Image: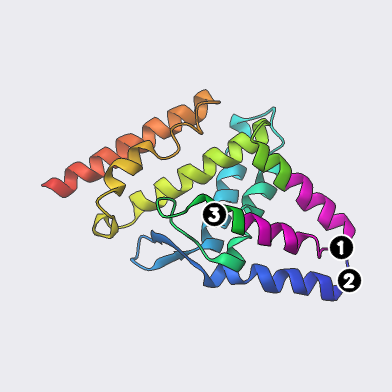
Amino acid sequence: MQYSDFLSILSVAEKLKCNTRHSDTSNGRRESVAEHSWRLALMAMLLADEFPDTDMNKVIQMCLIHDLGEAFTGDIATFDKMDADAKKEDMVYADWVETFPEIQKKQFRGLLAEMSALQTKEAKLYKALDKMEAVIQHNEADISSWLPLEYELQLTYGAEEVQFSEYMKGLKAHIDAWTKEKIEREKK
């Protein structure tokens, strides 16, 4: 890869460090999109032994690139994101990938197509982890940062995406118990 191509891609990706998400961190500041993607990749790495028949390197790659479109559009909270927003994000991301050197263009196209189809165990795992990371981050944030609709959303978000795996269903149940405890503590 040419140095200029490498630096150009990194320059766009750097915007994920600047773009914030709806979530707060445990110390009360807004989480960046890059921080979300980093922890998502870490989650995949930590769970490699739970999914021995899954190409975890591919899952980690998916985790690292899944929100790169937000370098152009910024993050839109899941409850505010419309189909038109998702289509625009996908379009600008795909257009950007077309500017990559051929090897990276082919790699990203393949990953994005697989992620979009959600048919492989790798794509399903990446998607489930993406949802679980958001719920975990909300649980780590002060409950005063939650919107009223998030009390229920915390318990339903990602429920469909974890259904492919007993381990992921168990993780979701464990996170849900944590959410319920957090809500109960707030009521006291």
Circles 3 and 2: CB distance less than 8 Å? no
Label annotation for residue 2: 2
For discs 1 and 2, the disc positioned in front in the rendered view:
1
Q: Residue 54, located in which quarter of the rendered image? A: top right
Q: Amino acid at mark 2?
A: Gln
Residue position marked by numbered label 3 in the rendering: 84
> Residue 69: which disc?
none
Q: Quadrant of residue 179?
A: top left
Identity, as a three-letter code, of the amino acid under mark 1? Pro
Tell me if 132 is positioned left or right of 91 in this view: left
Instruction: Describe the element under mark 3 as helix, strand or loop.
Output: helix
- The residue range painted magenta reads 89-111
Q: Is residue 93 magenta?
A: yes
In front: label 3 or label 2: 3
- Please indicate whether residue 166 sits to the left or right of residue 29 in the image: right
Cβ atoms under marks 1 and 2 closer than 8 Å: yes
Whole-percent x, y for residue 115 in the image: 66, 42
Magenta-colored stretch includes residue 183: no
Residue beneath disc 1:
101
Q: Main secondary structure of the magenta part?
A: helix
Residue at x 23%, y 59% (from the top left corner): 144
**Residue drawn at point x = 53 percent, y = 38 percent:** 128
Q: Is residue 64 visible?
A: yes
